[in-house]
Structure formats: C-alpha cells, structure tokens
Amino acid sequence: MKSSNIGGQAVLEGVMMKNRDSYAVAVRKPDGEIEIKKDTYRSIVGRFSALTRIPFVRGVFNFIDSLVLGMSTLTWSSSFYEEEEEKIMTEEEEKKAKRTEGILMAATMVFSFALAIGIFMILPYFISDFLKRWVPSYTVRLILEGIIRIGIFVGYVALISLMRDIKRLYMYHGAEHKCINCIEHGLPLNVENVKKSSKEHKRCGTSFMLFVMIVGIVLLFFVRVDSVVMRVVVRIALLPLIAGISYEIIRWAGSSSNPIVCILSKPGLMLQRLTTKEPDDDMIEVGIASVEAVFDWQAYLRENFGEQDGEETGDISGNLQRSM
C-alpha cells in the first residue's frame, strides 16, 4: 500500500481534507446541501517552510499547523449551525470581527494546549509521585505514570463519546478514514467502496497521541532529575522532541506494511475504535466531496494500481454548492 499523503480531520457535520498546501472542507448544511470551501494553507513558519521538511523537526511544526488549520476549519463548519440571526456588517466591522475571532481562536488554542499538558502530562506525574511511599522504585513509578496517562486519555475519549455531537463527529472521523483507506487500497472512490473500507488508519492523530505518551515515558528513562520542579519542567521541555519522534513513527507506519510496523500500530488502531464510528451514506458523500476537491484519486489509482478510469463515483454534484 502506497500512502496517498492526504490527511484530514472531522469537523462539525463535515470533513476537512488536506493535500500538500491545499485543503478543502465539506459540510452538510442544515438544508441538506454540501458546502465546500477550498483554500491554500500557509505554514506558521512562513518563509522558513523548509523546517517542515526536516526529519524530527517537521513533526513539531506540522503538529502546530494541524492545530491551527483544525481550529480554523472547525470554526468555519460551526458557522452553518449558529442560531444567532445574521447581522449585516460594514466592511470595517467585518475586519474587526475577523481580528477578534483570530484573537479568540489563538487564546482558545493556547488555553486548550496548556490544559491538555496539565491533565495528560503533569497530573499523571503527580499521581505516580504521590504513590512513592508504596512504590519506592523510580523506574516502576515511571512506568506507572505512563499507564495512568494512557488511562486518563482513554477515559477522556470514552467519556466525551457519550455526547451526541461528539458521536456524530466520530462518525465523520470514520468517513474521513474510510475514504482515504478506499483509495489507498486501490478502490474507486464511491459510496459502496468506502463503506467496505476500514475506519481505522495508521496515520491517525489518535495513534499519534498514543505514541506521544509512549515515547515520552521512554525518553524519561534517559533524563532523570531529583527536583520535583525540574521533573515537571523536563516533561514540558521534552514535548517538541517527543512530538518530532512520534510524527516520524506515524509517517513511517502510514506508508509501510512491515509486520513489525503493523504490530506497533495495533494499539493505536485499537484506540481508534473509540474515536471513529461507522458513518452513514450521507456522511460518506461529504467525505468523498472533500477528497475530490483537493486530490485526483483517479490519477493516483492509474499510477499505483494500473486503473484507467475506475468506476463511476455517482453523481452527487447536484447536491453540492461550491464556495471557493
């Protein structure tokens, strides 16, 4: 299986797909039509974009870029479901509103990131440290910290999956994976083939997060300090390196069928059973629309599987309203 190098995420009632610098968001609007927004994303590093191609360094910037783009597309998708009455604004008011939205989005990202570090990185350490009177071995406590961290993460994912909106988000997440798996396994991109494809994928962000936790514990075996404050600082300071290594593992796993790689990917794929759900046909159509806006899957099949034109994908164009 050759990687298509496309990826994406689920958004509110839709799917975002990214191929190199181009991305498209397809959303099923309340009236049943599919709205598509296609645009180009420029990395946060700007003219230093070469940093996004350096192994072990690119993972950090790609992770930040995915957060920025993910938040932006999620905000765009949610705009179709806002209950507030539409207000006619002047050009100046629109600019001010966009600036305010940008500031709020940045503040939300910083707060969410800090909260995630606190809950998933720092809290497990303090819990394991609290147990040192019963578990005197630092090595054992380090392993215990990793188990607690994974347990908190799995519990969090399972808990939010009980929410109706998150359930639908997980279904669109499944549609995203199934569309990518469909073309990467040589099948023409249509609803029937997508339905038959797997909803788990080795390049998923869920697997990335799991590797972040595992790699973090492994690195801590080689970096030991006595001060409680320094132990917290070390865990935060190592995050860029942890993200860089985890990204390379995911990137490698996504394009390899090596048996060892498949075994290493198993825990992440199992965890995806919580973060992906089987989508319905309408959701699959949204996923297909998003893929086709940024990726020529027929050319991909011809190049990698010898397919000429594939099968018809079905005419859903009558239900699409493009917004470029």
Image (cartoon, rainbow, N blue to C red):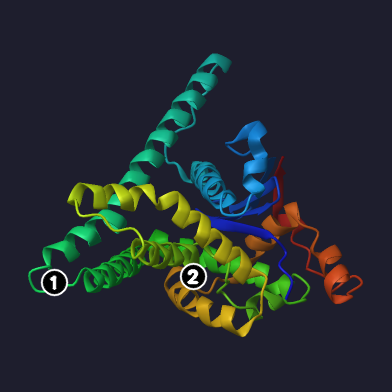
What's the amino acid at mark 1? Answer: Pro
User: In x, y percent, where is residue 269?
Assistant: 50, 76
Q: Earlier in the sequence, mark 1 or mark 2?
A: 1
Dot 1, crowdedness within 10 Å: few (<14), some or many (≥20)?
A: few
User: In x, y percent, where is residue 261?
Assistant: 58, 78
Task: Judge left or right: residue 83 versus residue 7.
Answer: left
Q: Please, what secondary structure does the residue beneath circle 2 have?
A: loop
In front here: 205 or 218? 218
- In the rendered image, the residue lying farthest to the bottom is 259
- Which residue in the structure is indicated by mark 2? 276
Q: Please, what secondary structure does the residue beneath circle 1 have?
A: loop
Camera sees residue 283: no
The residue under the point 49% across, 31% down is 86
The residue under the point 12% across, 68% down is 131
Quarter residue 295 falls in: bottom right
User: In x, y percent, where is residue 149?
Assistant: 30, 65
Quadrant that contains the C terminus: top right
In front here: 233 or 7? 233
Dot 2, crowdedness within 10 Å: few (<14), some or many (≥20)?
A: many
Vertical order, 215 against 113 (above or below) = below
- Which residue in the structure is indicated by mark 1? 136
Q: Are marks 1 and 2 in contact (CB under 8 Å)?
A: no
What's the amino acid at mark 2? Answer: Thr
In front here: 173 or 265? 265
Task: Judge left or right: residue 242 versus residue 32.
Answer: left
